[in-house]
Image (spheres, grey):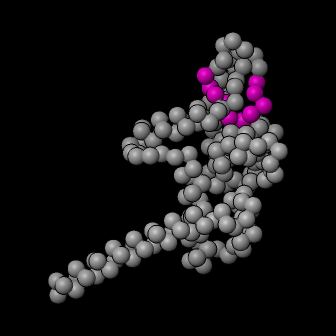
Amino acid sequence: GMRIDEVLSITQDSYNAYNQTVKPTRSKGKKNSKKRLIVINDECIKVIENYILNERTPALKKVKKDSLYLFVNLKINTLDDKLEPLKYLNFYNSLNSAAKKSNILGNVRTHTGRSHRAIELLRVVKDGKLKLTDEHFRLIMGWKNMESSEPYIQHENEQQAIELSRELSQMKRLLSNE
């Protein structure tokens, strides 16, 4: 559930594979914002380690200066001969390229993963599969208060209404065929 700006601001020093944590150096474009410690899972660690080994390190070998940022633009700046931090537009273009290669059509938003995470957490809490307090939820998502959850709750309620409507229509069709 990280914001894209948080991901792009991760430095090599703020990534800890052993403790499975990252601590972004900024959030919402603000360096002075409160920094949060984020726990990341095994799968995410594997992806990051694979990126470091197979993409970042080979690019680093071609330049004279490293970047303190973990995620870098792999197109080397030949004027300075260094790795530049990955920018939002670079990320957005890569995301759209990956979506096209995966035959994902439609509007691909950078916020989709974060939205999915919030809705996924809401569902498992509602279903009783996970016990989270509002404070836990707020900390996981990096929100100042729970009012930030309202759009996600509204979306989830709309989805449930649509699913219920479909089920009712199907039941009516089945009953009318009897």
**Residue at position x 56%, y 77% from top?**
127
- Left or right, 47 with respect to 12, comes to left
Q: Is residue 19 visible?
A: no
Residue most toward the top? 79
Give yes or no for residue 71 being in the magenta stretch.
Answer: yes
Answer above or below: position of 146 versus 91: below
When asked about the image quadrant of residue 99, the answer is: top left
When asked about the image quadrant of residue 143, the answer is: bottom right
Count of marks, rendered view: 0
Magenta part of the chain = 66-75
**Residue at position x 52%, y 39% from top?**
95
Answer above or below: position of 48 versus 159: above
Q: Quadrant of the C terminus?
A: bottom left
Answer above or below: position of 76 versus 48: above
Q: Locate residue 56, reporting x and y percent.
A: 66, 29
Relative depth, front residue between 151 and 50: 151
- Main secondary structure of the magenta stretch: loop
Q: Locate residue 118, reporting x and y percent.
A: 60, 62
When asked about the image quadrant of residue 13, the answer is: top right
Q: Locate residue 63, reporting x and y percent.
A: 71, 17
Give yes or no for residue 144 being in the magenta stretch.
Answer: no
**Residue at position x 62%, y 36% from top?**
88
Q: Is residue 130 visible?
A: yes
Q: Quadrant of the N terminus?
A: bottom right
Relative depth, front residue between 169 and 29: 29
**Residue at position x 76%, y 24% from top?**
66
Q: Locate residue 96, reporting x and y percent.
A: 48, 38
- Left or right, 104 with respect to 91, comes to left
